[in-house]
Amino acid sequence: MSTLPAFATVTLSPAVDVTLTCHAFPQPGNVITSLAEVETAGGKGLNVAQWLATRGHCVVAAGLLGRDNAMPFETLMDVSGIQDVLLRVPGSNRRNVMMTSPQGMFKLNRSAFPDLCSSDWSIERVLKACLSASVCVLAGSLPASIPATVYAEMIVRLREVGIPAVLDTSGLALRRGLEASPALIKPNRLECEQLLGVSLRQPNDFREACLKLLEQVPCVVLSDGANGCWFADRLAGGRVFHGSAPDVTVVDTTAAGDSLLAEFCHFYFPACVMDEAMMRFACAAGAAATTTPGALTPPMALVSRLASTVRVMPMV
């Protein structure tokens, strides 16, 4: 029997991620013909769930799922061995589009479930499915009709039954969730800038931001794309570390942050002690995820190879 901790993930805004490869970025009036198109079922929590399942964890996927196009998500969970306890709600899951070209890439993220009613779901029904887990990851944006305090309420309720919560969201949902003191948060640079009202440019800016966040949460993972990731943990004496980003050919940045977070959680729980190896593997996972279109999971052999190239440095 596996000794790995069991995870639950909560996804309230699942998405079909569509990656289009084009000759060039469009200009006004252009008609664009894609060279290739890949669709993957995901959403931040489901991306984390898929990664953790690949790593051998028992994973329960909770949250919401639109009935009208549920099949790709059901197939993903069935193939990955993820326990599907998502609440079926009326309507379709959103379709997000990433367009890539030699000039770069941009992404269109749509809002989830614009017609969602309060009678379609409840916090109690979502959390009931998470109570068998050792850790719960709350990830992603919220449908417009769901209050920004929902993650904060979930964090409090989970703590009452002894389940630590990991939070990966943005905006007001992140601000309110942080006030409830989750076990770990993973903002990216832009989300952290918006949260703290600061500009993060120099290494000391990131260090100070991590130390500020440690006043409210025991562990901080602050990602900055190709510039690497910042890690801070109270049990590490409040020290801040920077992990470099491995050099890869980027195909699609979808799910890169989710992969980084999942890989970190794979090592961090249940002991909740941070070390250099987990930082290296987290940075490697984020980079490896950018080499595949959509939310496809890259080979773990690639993650291991890239981890050996990551440099972890303490920031003093």
Image (cartoon, rainbow, N blue to C red):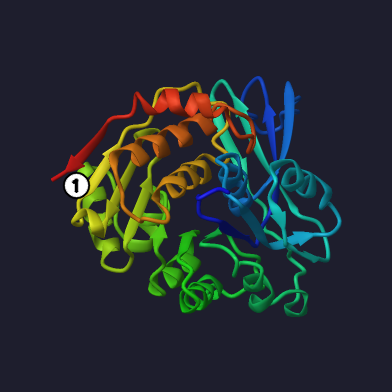
- Residue 183 drawn above or below residue 148: above
Where residue 61 appears, as percent x and y from the top left, is: 66, 57
Q: Is residue 287 above or below residue 193?
A: above
Secondary structure at numbered mark 1: helix
Give whichever of 33, 89 is nearer the camera: 89
> Residue 217's quadrant in the figure?
bottom left
* Residue 116 in picture, x, y percent from top left: 75, 70
Tally of numbered discs:
1
Q: Which of 268 and 210 is in front in this view?
A: 268
Q: Position of residue 68 (x, y in %)?
A: 86, 56
Which amino acid type corresponds to the residue marked 1 in the rendered image?
Asn
Q: Which residue is drawn at 31% across and 49% down?
A: 274
Left-right relation of 39 to 246: right
Residue occupying the far left of the picture: 316
Residue behind mark 1 = 204
Residue 59 placement, left or right of 230 = right
Residue 140 in sight from this viewpoint: no
Q: 286 or 171: which is nearer to us?
A: 286
Q: Nearer the viewer, residue 211 or 23?
A: 211
Residue drawn where x is 71% and y is 28% of the image: 30
Coordinates of residue 228 in the picture (x, y in percent): 35, 36
Residue situated furthest front in the rendering: 1
- Can the viewer see residue 122? yes
Q: Up-down: is 38 above or below 175? A: above
Q: Which image quadrant for residue 297? A: top right
